[in-house]
């Protein structure tokens, strides 16, 4: 292990690279990263970096976003297998057809979508700023929210704004059930429940707080509570336990397991991080017209602040 870490650190220095890691990465990757955060924080870090190379330890749409906002950098991802089934659920051709049939509708896309989808929409949001983004749109506008219907539904509840929802879900977050959560909570009556907005409405309704992965850390830090059930991908537990060692964290359960993992996020390993920095591949490249068009809705989001 120390050998591979030494290799990674040496390559990072040789390539003048920065390692950006999502909160769902395995603990060993989080520990070696220069920055660990949610999709929003990672997009800002990617834009701000002065490194020559960005090793993006996350999933493909996140690395694409880094390339869109900072095209002068070489962006590499540990493996192209790190995709996202939610992003795949919104095909660019299908969205173009929908858009042509619904002129005048404002399209808000969750950042979990491809660059080709981003290139067609009006504004991007993340789970960390979706409410702020929707509130920035005049109330008389009809909005399509894509591709996550659970996040979209939660935003509707928070804003009172009725939107058309694209029928996509995150297969990881919809596996958490009310029954399994109720059982775990009954065993630990003093815990606070913190859930990601991609969870089903019934699960969200049981939560004390619904927020993005980064805000989970802030919530648990500020809360006087000493124990929490974290209803999101299990990588989040590493960050919480590391930064808040005096508090106790339980993974949100599904009906079949005591925590849930995103198999795409978990395709990244220290070994393929080393290989990516060694070979500078797989590299994220985009047709320039798509990149430019995709940048517009991302910049609109970024202009609203963190
Ligand atoms: P966050 O932006 O809250 O980190 O979520 C990203 C994601 O992919 C959730 O499944
Ligand atoms: Fe995509 Fe869900 Fe994995 Fe997040 S947890 S990257 S939304 S499949």
Image (tube, rainbow, N blue to C red):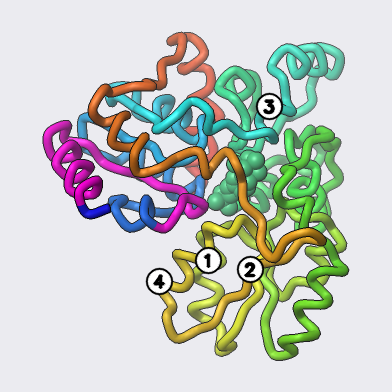
Please report the residue visible at 17 percent of the width from the left and 36 percent of the height from the top: 11
Q: Assess whether residue 259 is covered by the magenta stretch.
A: no
Q: Write down the residue under mark 2.
A: 251
Select label 2 or label 3 by which is in front. Answer: 2
Instruction: Kindly state the secondary structure of the residue where label 3 is placed.
Output: helix
Please report the residue visible at 47 percent of the width from the left and 31 percent of the height from the top: 65
**Going from the N terminus, do you reach mark 2 or mark 3 first?**
3
Q: Position of residue 284 (x, y in %)?
A: 41, 21
* Observer-nearest of 140 and 121: 121
Q: Assess whether residue 8 is covered by the magenta stretch.
A: yes
Which residues are the magenta region? Answer: 3-27
Neighbor class of circle 2 (other Cα within 10 Å; few <14, some 14-19, many 20+) is many
* Observer-nearest of 279 and 105: 279
Res 88 label:
3
Tags 3 and 1 in contact by the CB under 8 Å rule?
no
Q: Write down the residue under mark 1.
A: 237
- Quarter assignment of residue 158: bottom right
Q: Write down the residue under mark 4.
A: 242
Q: Position of residue 265 (x, y in %)?
A: 53, 42
- Quarter assignment of residue 154: bottom right
* Observer-nearest of 119 and 251: 251
Tags 3 and 4 in contact by the CB under 8 Å rule?
no
133 with respect to 218 (left or right): right
**Going from the N terminus, do you reach mark 4 or mark 1 first?**
1
**Going from the N terminus, do you reach mark 2 or mark 1 first?**
1
Residue 54 visible at all: yes
């Amino acid at each position: 292990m120390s050998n591979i870490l030494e290799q990674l650190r040496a390559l990072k220095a040789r390539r003048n690279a920065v390692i950006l890691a999502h909160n769902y990465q395995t603990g060993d990757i989080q520990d070696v990263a220069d920055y660990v955060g949610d999709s929003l924080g990672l997009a800002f870090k990617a834009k701000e970096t002065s490194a020559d190379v960005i090793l993006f330890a996350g999933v493909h749409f996140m690395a694409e976003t880094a390339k869109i906002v900072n095209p002068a950098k070489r962006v590499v991802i540990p493996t192209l297998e790190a995709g996202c089934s939610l992003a795949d659920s919104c095909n660019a051709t299908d969205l173009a057809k929908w858009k042509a049939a619904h002129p005048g509708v404002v399209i808000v896309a969750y950042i979990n979508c491809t660059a080709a989808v981003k290139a067609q929409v009006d504004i991007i949001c993340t789970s960390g700023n979706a409410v702020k983004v929707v509130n920035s749109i005049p109330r008389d506008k009809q909005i399509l929210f894509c591709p996550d219907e659970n996040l979209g539904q939660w935003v509707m509840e928070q804003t009172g704004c009725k939107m058309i929802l694209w029928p996509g879900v995150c297969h990881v977050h919809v596996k958490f059930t009310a029954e399994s959560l109720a059982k775990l909570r009954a065993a630990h009556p003093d815990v606070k429940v913190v859930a990601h907005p991609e969870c089903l409405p019934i699960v969200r309704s049981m939560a004390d707080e619904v927020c993005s992965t980064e805000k989970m850390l802030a919530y648990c830090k500020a809360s006087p509570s000493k124990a929490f059930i974290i209803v999101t991908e299990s990588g989040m537990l590493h960050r919480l336990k590391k930064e808040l060692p005096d508090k106790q964290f339980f993974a949100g359960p599904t009906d079949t397991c005591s925590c849930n993992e995103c198999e795409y996020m978990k395709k990244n390993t220290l070994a393929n991080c080393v290989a990516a920095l060694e070979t500078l591949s797989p590299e994220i490249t985009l047709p320039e017209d798509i990149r430019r068009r995709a940048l517009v809705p991302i910049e609109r989001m970024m202009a609203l602040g963190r």
